Structures are given as C-alpha cells and as structure tokens.
Image (spheres, grey):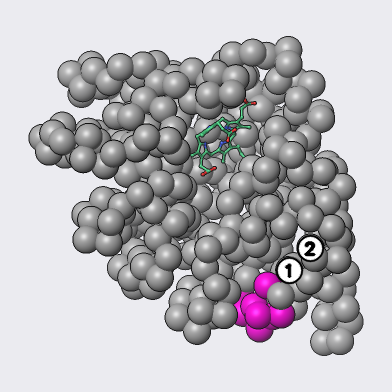
Amino acid sequence: MSKLFECIIGKKSSYTPIWFMRQAGRYLPEFQEIRKKNPDFIKLCLTPSLVKEITLQPIKRFNLDAAIIFSDILMVPYGLGQKVEFKKGLGPVLGKLDIDLIANNQPDKFTEKLQSVYESIGEVKKQSIEKEVIGFVGAPWTLLVYMINQKSPKKDFDIRTILKDENLTQRLLKIIEGRICLHIDHQINAGADVIQIFDSWAGLLPKEMLEKYCYIPNLRIVNHIKSKNVPSISFPKGIGKNYLDFCKIVKPSCISIDYELDPNWVLENLKDTPVQGGLHPKILLKDKKNLKEAVERYMNIFSDYPYIFNLGHGVLPETNPDTIKFIVNLIRERNERRSSRN
Ligand code: CP3
C-alpha cells in the first residue's frame, strides 16, 4: 500500500505524501508546448498518448506521490451532449443547455464519448504502477452551475437565475448525479486508485442551501465511491466553517481544505477526517523565505496527523516550476529527518 493511500484511510506516518491540484498544466513549459500544437482542449483530453504524457510530466519533474489524470470536470457535460469549448482568456464556454436532449442521453453513448479518458487512465496506470493514480469528477452543484450559467460564475453570478426553475434544477441534478457515478465507475475500472470530488463553487451557496445542493449530493457521490471500496477526497471550496457540517454529514475518506480555512481550526474541528492541502497558491509567487515558513506552518500543525501536502486550490499559471521543486524538497527532507529519528 502506498503512503498516500495509507494517509487517506487515516494511518499516521512520519512520511507526508505530496501532490498538487492542477499539477499538470499551464505553469509547465512542456505542457504549453503540447497545448500550442493542440488548440482544441477537449480533443486533447481525448487523446490517450498526449494525456498520458501530460499526466506524467509533473511526476517526471518532481517525483510526486500521485498522478492526477489530465482531464477536466467539464468532460461530464460534454459526455452528456452539451457543447463545451475552452476559449483563450475566457475559460470554459458551454453551449445552450437542452434538457430534453440531455435527458435522452444514453449511458452507452456517454461511455463511448469518454472512452478515451478511461483508456488514458489505463495507460498511465500501466506506466506508473508504483504511483497512486487519482481520478476525479466535479460535484453535482459545480457542474450544474457551469451547465446552466454556460461559463465560469466568477463574474456577474446570480444564484436566483441559476435556480429559477426548480423542476429543471431537480431534473438536471438527477441526471448529472447518475453520469458522475458512471464516470467514476469507468475511472475505477480503468485503474484509478482514488477519486477526488471538486465542488469548486460550493462557496456560492448561502448556508441555508448547503444541505440541499452541497452536502446531500456530495454524500450520495461519496457513498457510491465507498460502495466500490475506493477512497475519496472531497473539496467543497469556499464554505468556511461549514466544512465541519460537511465532514459530519458527508464523511469523505479525506477532506481537502481551501486557503481560507485556518489550519489550527481544522486540526481542532475536523480531527476525525484525514486532511489534504490548505496552502494559498499565491504564496508560491512570493520569496522563498515566506514560502518556507508557510509550508512549515502547515507541516508543524499537522505533524502528528494523517496529512497530505497540497495547496488550498490549483497551482497558478504564473508559478515557477522551480518553486514546486523547492516545496517537494522541503517536504522530502523533513520526511527523511523524521524517519531517521524513528
Ligand atoms: O489537476 C490536474 O493537473 C489535472 C487536470 C485538471 C484540469 N482541470 C485541467 C485543465 C483538473 C483536475 C481540472 C479540474 C477543474 N476544471 C476544476 C476543479 C478544480 C478547480 O480549479 O476548482 C474546474 C472548476 C474546471 C473547469 C475549468 N477547466 C476552468 C475554469 C478552466 C479554465 C481556467 C483554468 O483553470 O485554466 C479549465 C481549463 C483547464 N483545465 C486547463 C487545464 C490544464 C487549461 C486549459 C488551457 O490550456 O487553456
């Protein structure tokens, strides 16, 4: 069993595993080179030889403990038949939502459209047998937001517009949940060892709506993953102290914390759940002294706890790859010091 796997299932160890959300991607020149030649992002995600190469780029450079498959949470809406494009400077742009078309989408058709994703996972697993392979999905709420809003909700987002048609919302959530579970099953069958669930826009929900749109849908997905005997990592970004209710209700194998949470509060309050992440991605843009202190702060707080080192959100595109190396070295040196003491 790998150290990362042991950590997710709650074993304490002197070895802190490390990987980064968005470790494969825009900050790496070797990714940019491939990306330049492949302007269609969805097509790139459906090309196993390139997906394998991109997934393993950060592993080769930094020897991280896990490989997250190069794909996107929006592959599920794509598999359902909604148009998905990634435009330079704009991020994802989705086509108009046709609920009847989506309701008619057959599981076989969905699977066929995403077959290459599963093939890629198999390829990665074959090549990096000793590394944990992380598959992932977007949570129902986050996918609903993209599918109805048709773009990132970063600007001009009005939750009342998204939820104005209760019938549509409920119909869509049910379909999305089914396809998320199917996408998870195929990723597990192809070789994914762990599934991370990104609820990147959970923070848009007011407290009184969290149960209906965040906790319950995440609970259903986590229970589905549990039924496959696979561990899960949940990332309900932006919900502040409601992380506590989230953990009590959803009971994920491991909780990924965002940069807004105080790690001391996390240690006191979420102590029954293994923890991942937390460090602000912007700290990676600062000088080494500040960065080292910030990394050590997390490592000290969680030193006697099942903790996976990661960030509180994805690696920013302007991050220098050497900074990732610097952090990996800090963690690995600390691991060595701790294991020689034992
Ligand atoms: O983590 C990894 O290295 C694996 C690959 C991965 C991507 N997207 C590749 C990607 C993962 C895990 C994701 C998840 C994802 N996608 C999330 C959840 C995590 C989060 O950041 O909150 C979300 C919300 C998306 C939707 C999405 N995809 C957006 C908003 C964008 C555009 C802005 C951005 O972050 O780059 C994408 C495109 C995308 N997905 C890129 C990559 C490498 C950039 C594509 C490009 O080169 O233009």
Q: Nearer the viewer, residue 212 or 9?
A: 212
Total marks drawn? 2
Quick check: 243 left or right of 206? right
* Residue occupied by mark 1: 294
Mark 1: which secondary structure? helix
Q: Nearer the viewer, residue 46 or 287?
A: 287
Report the amino acid beneath label 2: Leu
| Quarter holding residue 102 | top left
| Quarter holding residue 93 | top left
Could you say where residue 305 lies in the image, as x and y percent from the top left?
Answer: 62, 79
Could you say where residue 97 lies in the image, as x and y percent from the top left?
Answer: 27, 20
Residue labelled 2 has its Cβ within 8 Å of some atom of ligand 1 = no
Mark 2: which secondary structure? helix
* Residue occupied by mark 2: 291
Judge whether residue 104 can be spotted in this image.
no
* Whether residue 155 is situated above or below residue 221 in the rendered picture: above
Q: Is residue 143 magenta?
A: no
Q: What crowding class fits label 1: few (fewer than 14 Cα within 10 Å), some (14-19), or many (20 or more)?
A: some
Report the amino acid beneath label 1: Ala
- Distance, label 2 to label 1, CA atoms, is 5 Å
State which region is magenta. Answer: 298-306
Judge whether residue 149 can be spotted in this image.
yes
Mark 2 touching mark 1, by CB under 8 A?
A: yes
| Quarter holding residue 291 | bottom right
The quarter of the rendering in which ligand 1 is drawn is top right
Quick check: 46 left or right of 309? left
* Residue under the image location 75 percent in, 53 percent down: 284
Quick check: 166 left or right of 235? left
